[in-house]
Amino acid sequence: MMDTAEMLKAFSRHRGNAIVVPGRGGRHWVEISDKPNRDVPLGDPAMGGHASFAMGLALAQPGEKIVLFDSDGDVQMGMGILATIAEQQPRNFYHFMLDNKCYATTGGQPVPNALKLAYHDMARACGYPRAYAYDNLETFSINVERILNEPGPVFVWLKVRPEIENKPIGSRSQWRKRSQVQVVMDLKKELGIAS
């Protein structure tokens, strides 16, 4: 298993100019990213919402590489999005899924059937042309550059250690440094889109 922050650091060396939707890894990513205006930290939307948003962004901006750091809980809440992404075939979409086998942001409840699911096989069965699984930081670090140079959609299952939060949401440290409005304005400016 990998530590999420260390995995994100390994990814960041190969990010290039990609737009990153940090999803559940967001609290680490805001400290690692060297291009915050190309990040779209949504915070904690409804479970399952990250992939739909990131796919829409990939379809709307086909000239931009879009990278999503999703979670096993999010994927289970909206599994149909795997088939939708595969059907749309966004060549600029890179779907990294962090699997900690629990709902860490709501207290660590186990994700259903967590020990038996093979998410990369599910992504392939839905139609992703490329899907991988990594549980070792060294192996992931060796392969991430190659993965990001492949045409999307690509699905990458990453087994990470759980970081369970047991505090009420209102008393947790807030990692988002910009409002949703500011995130959108910054990204539009970065992409040269008139407001």
Image (spheres, rainbow, N blue to C red):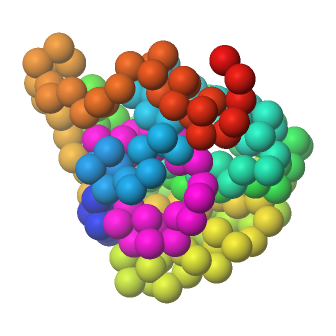
Q: Is residue 42 left or right of residue 144?
A: left
Q: Which residues are magenta?
A: 7-27
Q: Residue 169 in the image: x percent, y percent? A: 21, 18
The residue drawn where x is 31% and y is 56% is 32
**For residue 132, what is the image quadrant?**
bottom right
Does 133 appear above or below 68? Answer: below
Q: Is residue 113 left or right of residue 7?
A: right
Residue 108 shows in the view: no
Q: Nearer the viewer, residue 12 or 90?
A: 12
The residue drawn where x is 32% and y is 45% is 30
The quadrant of the rendering that contains the N terminus is bottom left
Does 34 appear above or below 194? Answer: below
Q: Is residue 170 left or right of residue 110?
A: left
Q: Nearer the viewer, residue 39 or 108?
A: 39
Q: Look at the image and say whether residue 22 sits in the magenta stretch.
A: yes
Q: Residue 8 in the image: x percent, y percent? A: 38, 61
Q: Residue 190 in the image: x percent, y percent? A: 59, 40
- Tally the numbered discs: 0
The residue drawn where x is 35% and y is 26% is 178
Q: Residue 12 in the image: x percent, y percent? A: 43, 65
Q: Nearer the viewer, residue 7 or 133?
A: 7
The quadrant of the rendering that contains the C terminus is top right
The residue drawn where x is 64% and y is 72% is 147
Q: Is residue 86 left or right of residue 82?
A: right
